Image (cartoon, helix red, strand yellow):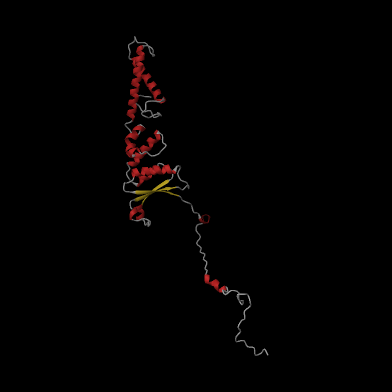
Amino acid sequence: MPRFTFDENRANLTVSQTGKEYNLRLLQRAQAIFTSLIDMLPSNYVSAVQGPNYTIEMKAVAVELSRIELALEDVNTDISFATVRTEFIYSIAAYMLFLNGRLPPTDFDDVEFKRFIMALIEIYFQGSIPKSIKDAAQYFLSDQVEVTENFLLIRKGATSYDISDQFGFNVDVDCSNNQFPDDVFRIDSIIRMLIDIIRPAHTLFRIRYIFKDDYVPNDGAGVLDSMRWHLSSYWYEDFRKYCAGIRDRDRLGVKTNQAVTNEDHSEDF
């Protein structure tokens, strides 16, 4: 690898100068410097391998020069946000975004954490606008996210709000797949933390997980326009029954006499 050139294939981009990858880079760089130092010697120094005292001393010098070169190469990569090491991203940017070291409970490795911080910086400098809030929530959600502001809903005729809701907004998560996101409580706490960073300080918000069901009436034929009604009257049934008990019978079941009036019996004799 050319000297003082960023190697995109490097796996270890931390500030710690340890590990198998670093030791291999150190060995390769020290060997190149050692060879250059040997070539600078007069012709009476003929040893090309480590053995005599002067080669041992040059090897030690080559190793230390290699450490300095590798450190300078790493520092040179820190001049850009695209290549800066994750530890510096936290100390410079993340520490200011997340006050008092209150980091979100993510399970990112150092590379993923760096990408997250870079995305958050880009979102943050968009300003405290609905798009920034949506992008922050969408980073951890695969579902569709919509941000609605209460005062705009009131202008469109919403009647469920009053003057106390004028500085509020809603983050609606469309759960059309009829299930919550994986590990919803952890994701919800992360999203709330990010929104607290981005939103205007005087605003309040709610996160709503919305479920939807598709309604297909009559196998897709649409809604049928028909009507059905039923009329009943409780007092109509009172006319159909005798409320005084058993007709023509007293309380003991004996047949009662019926008074007969205005009957003509003149032809019975």
Q: Residue furthest front?
A: 252
Task: Give x and y (percent) for residue 224.
Answer: 51, 60
Say whether residue 267 is left or right of residue 177. right
- Which quadrant would residue 41 be assigned to in this image? top left
Whether residue 81 is visible to the viewer of this picture, yes or no, is no
- Which quadrant would residue 160 be assigned to in this image? bottom left
Q: Is residue 127 above or below residue 155?
A: above
Q: Is residue 251 above or below residue 168?
A: below
Please identify the quadrant where the N terminus is shown.
top left
Residue at figure coordinates x 38%, y 22% from the top left: 26
Residue at figure coordinates x 35%, y 23% from the top left: 67
Residue at figure coordinates x 35%, y 52% from the top left: 150
Q: Residue furthest top?
A: 44
Residue at figure coordinates x 40%, y 43% from the top left: 189
Please identify the quadrant where the C terminus is shown.
bottom right
Task: Give x and y (percent) for residue 11.
Answer: 41, 29
- Which quadrant would residue 104 be assigned to in this image? top left
Q: How many marks?
A: 0
Task: Give x and y (percent) for residue 198.
Answer: 34, 44
Task: Give x and y (percent) for residue 263.
Answer: 62, 86
Seen from the viewer's position, the closer of residues 250 and 220 is: 250
Whether residue 150 is visible to the viewer of this picture, yes or no, is yes
Q: Is residue 24 above or below residue 54?
A: below
